[in-house]
Amino acid sequence: MQKDAYTYLTEHGIKPSPQRMAVMEYLIANPVHPTVEAIHAALVGRMPTLSKTTVYNTLKLFVESGAAQVLTINEKMTNFDADVEPHAHFLCAECGEIYDIAENEEMVKQATALPENFQLDTTSVYLRGICPKCLQKKNK
C-alpha cells in the first residue's frame, strides 16, 4: 500500500482532517497492527490536543468506510490494519507480534466448509503460534 493518506482517505469517501490524516499516515507508515493507545502515544507529541477518543472515533470511521480493518486476534486488545486487501494474521504467543500472512482463495475454501446455500462475503483468518524469531530464541 503505497498511497498517501490524503488519496487513501478520499478514495474511501472520508473527508481528510488533520487528525484523520495523522492517524492514516501512522497506519500506513507503521504496518505493525497498532492499538488505539499506541497510535495516540505516537501522535500526541506532535498533536497535543489529540485525545484517545478522537483516535478511537477516527479508527471506527476508517473501519466503517473500508479504509482499515479491526483485528480481534488478541482477546486483550484491539488492533488496526490499513491494509484491507485479503490476508490472514498470525499472532505470536511468545512476543505478541502480529504478522501479515498471504492468503489465497483456495486456502480459505479449504479452511471453511460452508453448508449448501450459504454465500461467503468476507473472512478473517487468524493463526496463532510462535514466530521464527521466538522459535530461534527458544532453541538456543
Image (cartoon, rainbow, N blue to C red):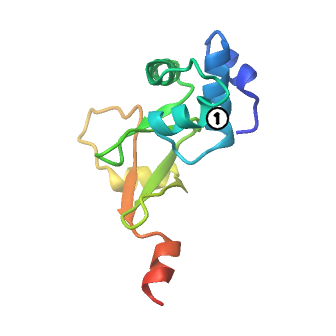
Comparing 63 with 85, the one in front is 63
User: Position of 7 compared to 117: left or right?
Assistant: right
Q: Callout 1: few (<14), some (14-19), or many (20+) C-alpha neighbours within 10 Å?
A: some
Q: Residue furthest top?
A: 15
Location of mark 1 (residue): 26
Comparing 103 with 74, the one in front is 74
Residue at disc 1, secondary structure? helix
User: Position of 44 compared to 57: left or right?
Assistant: right
| Residue 105 image point, x, y percent | 49, 48
| Residue 87 image point, x, y percent | 52, 47
User: Position of 70 compared to 72: left or right?
Assistant: right
Q: How many numbered discs sit on the rendered protein?
A: 1
Which amino acid, mark 1?
Tyr
User: Position of 96 compared to 38: left or right?
Assistant: left
Which residue does the image show at 42% across and 50% down from the upper left?
Answer: 108
Which residue does the image show at 47% across and 50% down from the upper left?
Answer: 88
Comparing 35 with 3, the one in front is 35
Q: In which quadrant of the rendered view does residue 12 lie?
A: top right
Q: Residue furthest left?
A: 115
| Residue 77 image point, x, y percent | 35, 42
Quadrant into which the N terminus falls = top right
Q: Residue furthest bottom?
A: 140
> Relative to 3, does residue 75 appear above or below in the rendering?
below
| Residue 22 image point, x, y percent | 66, 25
Comparing 62 with 125, the one in front is 62
Which residue does the image show at 71% across and 26% down from the upper left?
Answer: 5
> Relative to 104, does residue 29 appear above or below in the rendering?
above
